[in-house]
Amino acid sequence: MIEHLPALIIAIPLFGAFIAPLFKKKQSIAAVWAILITAITVILSLMLMYQVRLHGIIVYVFGADKPTIVLPSGYKVPIRIMFEIDGIGAFMAISATLMSFVGALYSYSHVKAESGLEKYYALLLLLEVGILGMVLTGDLFNLFVFLEIAGIAGSALVGFRNYRGEASEAGIKYLIVSAVASLMVLFAIGILYGEYGNLNLAYISRQVSLSTLDMIAFGLLFASFAMKCGSVPMHYWVPDAYTEVPAGINPVLLVSTYASLYALFRVSFTLFANVSISLERVGWIMSVLGVLTMFIGVTMALVQKDVKRLMSYHAISQTGYMLLGVGVGLTVLHNSDALAEFGRTAMAGGIFHIINHIIYKSLLLMTAGALFYVTGTRNLNEMGGLARKMPITTLCFIVGAAAISGLPPFNGFASKFLIYESSYRLNPLLAVFAMVTSILTLASFVKVFASAFLGPPLEKFENVREVPRPMIVAMVILALLCILFGLFPDVVLNKIVYPAVDALINVAQYQSWGGLA
Amino acid sequence: MISKLVTGSGYWSPLLWLAFLILFTLIGYVIYSRGNPSYKKESEQVKPYLSGNAEPSKEKIQVRASDIYWGFIEALKEYYKVLQAIHTGDVRDYILWYLGVGTVILFLLVGGA
């Protein structure tokens, strides 16, 4: 079974997605089914990470006699579909499965009153399949296919509450943006296929040169994935989508966004690793986009009155930290001294921030979902004094808000600290912007805390009660992770973050399919 | 071995920080507990007006989200004017921005090829 782990981790949620519509008449069973399937994928992703740590890169070839046969006899180029899983792929898989599980658990109560839940859970599982496929594949065309699966499932979920005009509008916008980005990705893949006659990522990465066609393909891939991960100034779809999607889907949609960020990193570090002259320039582009993203995201968040929209702008802002951290690493990738001194640390900060942000932003969006669940509004002006009525949600919010603001000892501080200390070495201004953004983030969450949770108890919320237990459990799991990742950052860094960073840096191993060929 | 976050320029020890936080919280509590005990929750002390004026409804005295950071937003009015003008909510603009940024990135990359 272990040797088929990469196939199973896709096949099981796919099977789950196709079975879910059968529970149309018993929708609570569909919820339990989704929780069960996502729980299994969490276990599989942990096993996958263990295997990657134990044996290095895992190569799984579909359609071969043995899943490890990369090249059929007599061939010099790979012709089969394959998954190639290294540290960063396994890291992203853990993030995807964990958030799918937490999202399914939260959804059990959160969307109980809605209809069409069998489709909801089928789409949730399909979204998980799309993300997992994107982060595990070693083939460019499959990357496109899984990107499409994630995009279509995601847009259907954004528009799930189709009785609300805004939700339908947001769903269509997300679909259009995803379709345009996917089309350009396909165009870039077509260019590379036309040039090299192959779709295998590792194979093409060895052939890529500084030709104009290659650079056009690189530019198209870079811009498309930058838009899909919500980089400023291509971030406009993010607040629409994150605000309208049901809160239980927010964690999965967040990971879906970061699957595109992963693709951006994979393209920059692996596919175009040979283009060393341009990589420094690309690193600077990434860092500058990062700074713009974090600053514009947070200043837009400060003026929002809709609690989910405010948090959505923060999601944009936090993506800036990841771009900055990894961008600094990319800038000095071919300068071994600088890479050892601060580049690797900056990348670790950026990658660590991905999982930290997924955890605390999911927690915050869930608390926003809890506020909507009990008050029926997302408008902060209409809320107040809810801390007395919802003590556990309030505590979870405080943990999430402290984490996103980079307050010690929560997880957000750990990754931001790495980014500050390393980006400063490339250019002090980068670190200054990162710190100012953190201060503004704290200010913004003080506003949410003061207006929604503090203040006198309002008469209209006299009968409000704490949210149901499954929602609480999902929030508490994430709050505990915020604390644990903050108190023991070295454990997370050594077990999953540095292997992911080294996988991006050591491209030669990826190019030789982990040494198999 | 105490958990440490090594950055290359130094290190951060979260558990040590937590230990100090607990210590200072205890010191703070000791100071607090020695404070003036005359405050009474169920008395007139908690009312907003001691003058005898009628208390307005809770909804009216609540500080709303829009009121918070009013001065900050007013000071940066021109910045926000530009920022809000580009957030049109029109999906055609979303695609135009993508095409614009994509073109700039292509020029930067192809220019160096």
Image (cartoon, coloured by chain):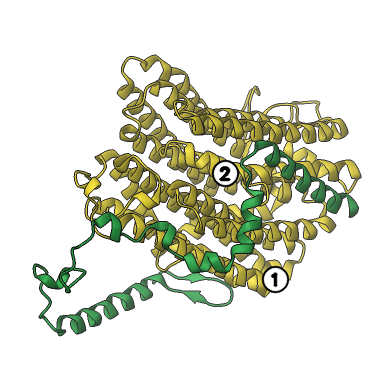
Chain colours: A yellow, B green
A386 above or below A164? below
Give whichever of A190, A500 is nearer the camera.
Answer: A190
Q: Residue A293: give x, y in percent of width and height.
A: 63, 56
Q: Are marks 1 and 2 on the same chain?
A: yes
Question: Quick one: label 1, few (<14), some, or many (20+) residues within 10 Å?
Answer: some
Comparing B7 with A465, the one in front is A465
Of the 4 image quadrants, the one containing the N terminus of chain B is: bottom left
Quarter of the figure with residue A98: top left
Mark on residue A238? 2
| Chain to which the residue tagged by mark 2 belongs | A
**Left or right relative to A247: residue A49:** right
Write down the residue under mark 1: A426
Q: Can you give x and y, in whole percent of width and height, for residue A251 in the image?
A: 46, 42
Residue at x-position 52% and y-position 54%: A314
Image location of residue A493, percent across then percent down: 50, 59
Please say if B97 is above or below A182.
Answer: below
Q: Which quadrant would residue A92 be assigned to in this image?
A: top right
| Label tally | 2
Instruction: Identify residue type, mark 2.
Output: Val
Q: Which amino acid does label 1 sit on?
A: Leu
Image point (64%, 73%), residue name: A424
Q: Which residue is drawn at 35% across and 38% down?
A: A106
Label 2's element? helix
Measured in 3D between alpha carbons, the distance from the residue under mark 1 to the one under mark 2, in whole angstroms, is: 30 Å
Q: Is residue A237 left or right of residue A371?
A: right
The answer to whether residue A402 is left or right of residue A128 is left
Q: Quadrant of residue A180?
A: top right
Packing grade of label 2 (10 A; few <14, some 14-19, many >=20) is many
